[in-house]
Image (cartoon, coloured by chain):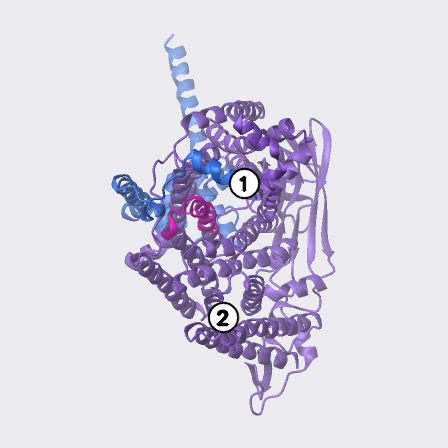
Amino acid sequence: MLAEIGFIATWLAIAVALYGIVASAIGYYRRLPAWTVSARNAVYIVFGALSIAIGALLIGLITENYHIAYIWTVSNPNMPMFYRMTALWGSQAGSLLFWCWLMSAFSALSVALNWRTNNRLMPHVILFQLTLTAFFTLLLVAIENPFARYWVAGEEVLQAALQPAGAVAPAMTALSESAKGLNPLLRHFGMAIHPPLLYLGFVGFLVPCAFAFAALATGDLSIQWIKASRRWTLTAWIFLGLGLVLGGRWAYDVLGWGGYWGWDPVENAAFLPWLIGTAYLHSIMIQEKRGMFKTWNMALMVATFSAVIFGTFATRSGLVESVHSFARSDIGFPMFALWFSVTLTLIGLIIWRRAAGGLRDDHPMTSFLSREGLFLLNNFVFLALFIAIFWGSFGAPITSELFFDTKITLGAEYFLGVTSPLFLALFILMGIAPLSGWGASALRRMGTGLLIPSTLTLLTLFGFILMGHTKAPTLIGYGLVALAGWVAVYETYRAVRARQTHLKENPVAALIALARRNPRRYGGYLIHVGVAVIGIGIIGSTAYQRETQATLSVGGELSLDGYTLRYEQFEGGQIAEDGRIMDIAVVGVYRDGQHLATLRPRRDFFPQQQDMNTMTIAAAHSTLENDIYVLLLDWDEISQTSATFKVYINPLINLVWWGALILIAGTAIGLYPTVTAEVVTRRVSDVPNAFAKGRA
Amino acid sequence: MRYILFALLFFIGGLGWNIGAQNDAPRTVTADEVNAIAQELYCPVCENITLDTCGTAACADWRYEIQLQLEAGFTSEQIKADFVRRFGDRVVGTPQDPLLRALSLVTPFVLVAAGLILLLKWYWGEKRAPQRHILDTLPPVAEPSDADLRARIERDSQR
């Protein structure tokens, strides 16, 4: 029954979405507002229908309805309730349904919140959002139906949404005994949060792109579409950023290679829209302040959404092989067609509007050292990063396979070599742009503003040297990153001091007042601090990572970078609640003879799983200084007296996660509505002395 | 004296023989040495995973092969070249084939340089173009004189 409810609700969503597309077009082009209202209601109904569909699948997962093929594939009776629920996005069909539901939720929310203020843009916003939702939902039912059930017809087992003639449902006991369960790689808390955040980021960009489309289609190319969509963009951007960071954390905890970013094509596919989205968030400030870069901003928004669809296509189609991607699927070609047609349509609209003069800038560029000039350079560096990463992940491998019939992989060597100078250039711009002025170069101001942050940077560098981080290239990197962070801190400090001096406020009250008066600026500064903290964590953990591998007998020790690890004992064959068998090594960590921690690296074996049934789970002792990260690679099966360990020391790695928290705080401030100063008007006669003075 | 000389030559010869024999014996290779090379090689059959972190039995065999090659005196470059010869350019982080290597490494710089040229061309175009401002198209508005302004404010204040 659940499968039927879900299936019918999905088709209802498609039918209503198609109706909504037609209704919004009629409402706008025939100037019939009632049709636009009807289209808006269609958006709400699509959301309702998809909520019923996703609810049906979720109930199926919770109640272990293994007649539904998807549930049989991603769940089994041994799995705890938490992972049964997160199995909703554990495979292609379920995650696609989740994606469609999120799309409908974003559409409904954006339409509800912008209906009054942006009524003129609404028909096209609805048209764009419903077209995309209808497309993805159609893909879902036509190719990856999560509501297909198992049927038995004679000797044959079939998968179909509706009961085929002569087929019967198989016995539930047989299904539950053979149910496969969630991929072990996905049984981690990070995987409960990482995919939804990533999807929220991806899908969230639907809203600003819908507003861009509406502006292009209606010709209302004023600042309105940017104002309406800025918070949506920032929301999508932070979700995507957090999804990336949590994905890194999941890889660090689960994939067992001592790192968090492997420059894998799927990781990069999620990073690309974030890069362009960041460029866009900077660039729209110039349009808001100076009426410049109108075409550029449109192009950046289109590129961001295009990168979102391309990333989804690459991950879900099997275009690239990755530990992060879904299995090869037939949805590849339709998704490629969607990516191509959406991108082409939007580019065509931009060219048309530009040719008609609708995207002409209000001011010319005067200097590269003005704030708009520096923002433009920042955009250029983001674009260069986009090109370098896209080329390394997709361009070069596809070109090589197509034209040279050779498969190639571009690895960390390529990416670190090409992107490191670009990232450093970004940090330089991050350091000086906040000190620049609009419309003109302000070299003197920059010089004065950099004085104290530079001193603080030198002190920071001294600290790194004391820690033993003395390689010249990394000190340059640390310096540039720290400077960008200190400039943001110092600019905030200066503003707090000014309020303290003139308004006699205490520092906390001054800081809160500043954040409320100009949340974008001070939220932005906090984001810069977060990015700088992440940057230092990345440099430290990449350049100063140490590793060793050794086989130890019980009681044996190995030393690395001042730490001693002692193999204490082996606890084999521990059975967990979900049926996995855990082999655990107990390892003591010592420094200068002092016991710091007891770690339990382990190997998990999932007996019910056919492929990928073994996982190496690291154990780590974390401090702000570093992580001691231990993997149990192998052990003597019979005597259990010796085991092989791989140990990593990852300096400053925890700054990556702490920086992400600062990033969230900064974005939360940036999203806070601006408090506009109340305009106080008084009659001139109320202040008689004013003119008395003037006459005197 | 002659006997002493012969004995010395015999001793030196024996020492040399012994040293040569020691050189022929396989040297001990640590797991860290193997991992240092395995880190730079990708598993030929898995998905973008380097050999040092790949958990499959096949990868364990390849790591053992690297150990044997190191013991036999192969250099890191020779081992990588051997893997490329057997499994193709996909096992290394940047292709060894000169054409593919150049294509992979140079293209992004060419694209970025082209972008930079376009940016600079646009910038010089902006600099040379006549200054435009949206308000320039509006008819000029006469600025009120101070006397006019003061008179207007005083008139308003008397209402």
Where residue B76 sits: x, y (%)? 41, 39
- Look at chain B in the picture and name its colour: blue
Q: Quadrant of residue A529?
A: top right
Query: In the visual, does A103 lie left or right of A396?
Result: right
Chain bearing mark 1: A
Where residue B74 sits: x, y (%)? 40, 38
Decide whether the magenta segment is chiefly helix, strand or loop.
Answer: helix
- Look at chain A in the picture and name its colour: purple
Quadrant (top left/top right/bottom left/bottom right) for the C terminus of chain A: top right
Q: Which mark is residue A130?
A: 2
The residue that label 1 is drawn on is: A521
Does the magenta segment cover residue A277?
Answer: yes
Residue closest to the eye, A499 or A193: A499
Start-end of magenta stretch: A274-295
Q: Quadrant of residue A456?
A: top right
Furthest residue toward top:
B1
Where residue A51 sits: x, y (%)? 62, 71
The amino acid type found where label 1 is placed reads Arg
